[in-house]
Amino acid sequence: MLAGCNLTEHSEQRSLDNKNTSTDVQSSLLANDDICEKGDANLRQPHEDCQPPSEGVIEVEHPVENIEQTLVNALKIHDDIAESSQEVMPNANLWFYVAEQLEFDVPSNQGRIIAQKNWYLKHPNYMQRVSNRASPFLYYIVDRLEAEGMPLDIALLPIVESAFDPFAYSHGRAAGMWQFIPGTGKNYGMKQTWWYDGRRDIIESTNGAIAYLKRLHKMFDGNWLHALAAYNSGEGRVMRSIRKNKRLGKPTDFWSLDLPRETRAYVPKLLALTDILRNRESNKFAWPSIKNTPVLDIVDVGSQIDLSKAANMAGLTTAELQALNPGFNRWATDPDGPHHLLIPLSNLDTFKVALTQTPASDMLNWVRYKIRSGDSLDKIANKYNTTTDVIKEINNLKTSRIIAGKHLLVPVALKSIEEYALSADQRLKKTQSVVRGSHKTEHKVRSGDTLWDIAQKHKVAVRDLAKWNKMAPRDPLKVGMNLVVWSGKPSMSVSQSAISRNITYRVRSGDSLSRIANRFNVSIQEIVQWNNLQGKKYLQPGQKLKLTIDVTKT
């Protein structure tokens, strides 16, 4: 569809604020890199504003290794992906189609944008990986954006949010390609259960992101920079900053607002990508290629189905099917829906034929379980990697009371749980197995435990403990769950060795030693020692702190 369309008439740029505004001079984090100053002689921003990106938004985790290769394998498009962008006609490359309709103005002398742009230009391999991840999903995203009258610049936003990784998560509890936190996800129709998380579902999260962005665009009177800033930091945060500037008689354009560090870099990242894609030739950047044609179809299978069985029916590996359908947490789809699967067009006929020949009762594997003395529905559900609600529904149980000697019908995975490599359990297992220290222990959560208590007991940082266990620091704990705890420093290869840099950090309103320590991956004790803060309880805004940071970890 997209390949055949003419350019739509967008003669007027969408309303964007691009005024440059000076702020107080602060010390530069990148002591040897003054790119923010070079971008605009009149612009001086705090050092965090020009912090270059690494993988998507700051502190996003990518739990699935080489997910881009799995996605490419699922589509059987190795040669297409590897094509040089110069060898593809403009309308045949979906990225180029997007480029021809980009609408956002990008100021040429804004230092924050220049910093991000230079990073992307210096990392073409990163952009190739991102494009590979986008290859199955970009057509659907562009199609939906056009249908909703949205600027196609938004198609670049998943690069900033997650590097187009549908399995990405942050320690702020955001998940998926569009990085929704649980509450906002639910507000925009993304169901979240033991079986399924709509924040990672390509269809649900894309539609939710478009609806949320449209609402923000309207809320901020058509100002896309404000809307994007609000998508990142929350509409309340941006509204308060605008009101504050109005009270003080200051400009209210994006560049003048007092916003969180991540947000001040977030919008420039998107504008940098817009500029690179729009001006590929002058930037001398070979943007990767994605064919401008649909590659997936949405199939409603009608009921719960084992993902391994569905993969066999489609001629895919289980990992390939899971990579295309990352919303499903377990070995099967959610018994209560949704029941749709994304299937490659090349495999569609095969899958549909198999689907018509498979009755609903054969979508899952079943066991007839004899209840033993001491059994409970929880124990049985854990044994077979399902939920008590499913067992109760299948067996028409009104309560959780069961009787020894009776039988229960229980759905079970067709293959061993380890075969479902991209399920939530296996992703957690992989995360917990990564060596983070010289000694590994496990802590079984008891009633009343908190991450803070456990971290204190083992003398580790809460943030580290959460990261080792694929959690956010504020996530609730479940009694009985096992947490991995690492102690001691791991032996590091040359490529992993620390690179230290001394910086000066200016304390801001709301800062605390704990917050600064977490931000720069150092301990509170180290900050106290470096700055002779023994006996001092409070920090003062404007106070300067000396820090020694490992730049490989920031």
Image (spheres, rainbow, N blue to C red):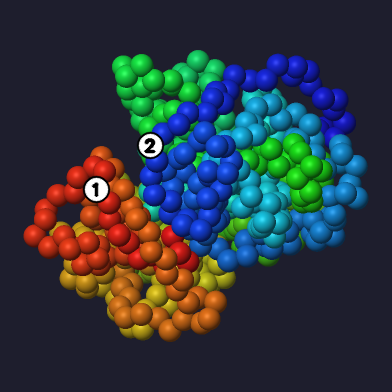
Residue 314 drawn above or below residue 181: below
**The one of 384 and 259 positioned closer to us in this rendering:** 259
Query: Element at badge 2?
Result: loop
Q: Amino acid at mark 2?
A: Asp
Which residue sits at x=54%, y=25%?
19
Furthest residue toward front: 41
Amino acid type at mark 1: Gln
> Residue placed at 79% from the left, 31% from the top?
100
Neighbor class of circle 1 (other Cα within 10 Å; few <14, some 14-19, many 20+) is few
Judge whether 379 appears above or below 362 on screen: below
Q: Is residue 177 visible?
A: no
Q: Which is more toward the observer, 83 or 475?
A: 83
Where is residue 218? Give x, y as percent: 51, 18
**Which image quarter holds the C terminus?**
bottom left
In the image, what residue occupies the spot 24% across and 48% down? 543
Q: Mark 1 highlights which residue?
A: 543
Q: CA distance from mark 1 to mark 2?
A: 14 Å
**Residue 531 falls in image quadrant:** bottom left
